[in-house]
Image (spheres, helix red, strand yellow):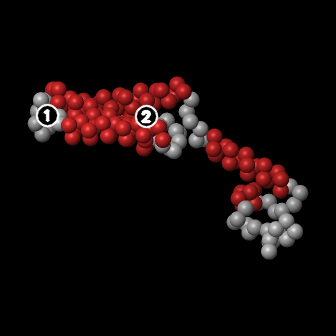
C-alpha cells in the first residue's frame, strides 16, 4: 500500500514531465524543477489567453464583412444564370474571395466553431430574407420557424460554448 509512510517507487523517466524536460533526478533541486514545470505550463496557458477587447472587436468586424460578402456572393449567384452572365459571375467570385479572406482574419481571434455558426446562421437568415424581398420567393411559417431556430442555435452556441478565444 502506497501512502505518506510508504510512497512507493519514484515515477519512471517518462512519467514525470519535469524529469523528462529538464533531465533532473530526485533530490534537493527537485523543487526548482517543479517550479520550472509550473512556469512552463503557465507560459503554455498564456499563449491561449483571450485576445484583448479591441482585437476581438476587429475580429467580429471581419466576421461581419465575411457575412455581408458571403450573402452578396450568394445573391449574385442567384442571378448569374449558372455563372453564364459575366457581371454577376464576377461579383460572385470577388464576393466569395472577400468573404473567405475576412473569415480568415476573424479566425485569428475567434474559434472556428463560433465563426462558422455565426457566419452560416446569419448568412442563411439574410439570404432567405433577400430571396423573399428581392426575388419574390415565398416565406411560410415553417421556414420562418426554421430560421428562428437557426438564429436561436447561433445564440446558444455563442453564449454557452466552452470554446476558448485564441
Residue 152 seen in the current view: yes
- Front residue of 44 and 131: 131
Say if 131 sits above or below 6 in the image: above
- Tell me the tag on residue 138: 1
Residue 36 place in picture, x, y as percent: 76, 49
Crowd class of label 2 (few under 14; some 14 to 19; many from 20; radius 10 Å): many
Q: What quarter of the picture does the N terminus occupy? A: bottom right
Marks 1/2: CA–CA distance:
33 Å
Say if 30 sits above or below 57 in the image: below
User: In the orientation shown, which residue stands out farthest toward the bottom?
Assistant: 1
Residue 95 seen in the current view: no
Residue 59 place in picture, x, y as percent: 45, 30
Q: Determine which quarter of the picture holds residue 154.
A: top left
In the image: residue 157, left or right of residue 76: right
- Tell me the tag on residue 75: none
Q: Which residue is mark 2?
A: 106
The kind of secondary structure element at disc 2 is helix
User: In the orientation shown, which residue stands out farthest toward the front?
Assistant: 141
Q: At x 35% / y 28%, what residue is drawn?
A: 65
Q: At x 73% / y 49%, what residue is drawn?
A: 38
Residue 86 place in picture, x, y as percent: 13, 31
- Front residue of 38 and 98: 38
Amino acid at each position: 500500500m502506497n501512502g505518506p509512510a510508504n510512497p512507493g517507487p519514484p515515477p519512471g523517466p517518462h512519467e514525470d514531465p519535469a524529469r523528462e524536460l529538464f533531465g533532473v533526478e530526485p533530490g534537493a533541486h527537485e523543487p526548482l524543477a517543479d517550479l520550472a514545470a509550473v512556469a512552463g505550463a503557465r507560459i503554455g496557458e498564456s499563449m491561449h489567453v483571450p485576445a484583448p477587447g479591441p482585437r476581438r472587436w476587429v475580429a467580429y468586424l471581419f466576421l461581419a464583412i465575411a457575412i455581408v460578402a458571403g450573402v452578396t456572393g450568394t445573391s449574385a449567384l442567384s442571378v448569374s444564370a449558372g455563372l453564364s452572365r459575366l457581371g454577376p459571375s464576377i461579383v460572385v467570385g470577388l464576393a466569395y474571395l472577400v468573404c473567405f479572406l475576412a473569415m480568415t482574419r476573424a479566425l485569428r481571434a475567434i474559434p472556428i466553431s463560433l465563426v462558422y455558426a455565426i457566419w452560416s446562421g446569419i448568412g442563411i437568415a439574410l439570404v432567405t430574407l433577400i430571396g423573399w424581398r428581392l426575388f419574390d420567393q415565398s416565406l411560410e411559417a415553417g421556414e420562418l420557424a426554421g430560421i428562428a431556430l437557426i438564429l436561436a442555435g447561433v445564440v446558444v452556441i455563442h453564449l454557452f460554448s466552452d470554446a476558448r478565444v485564441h
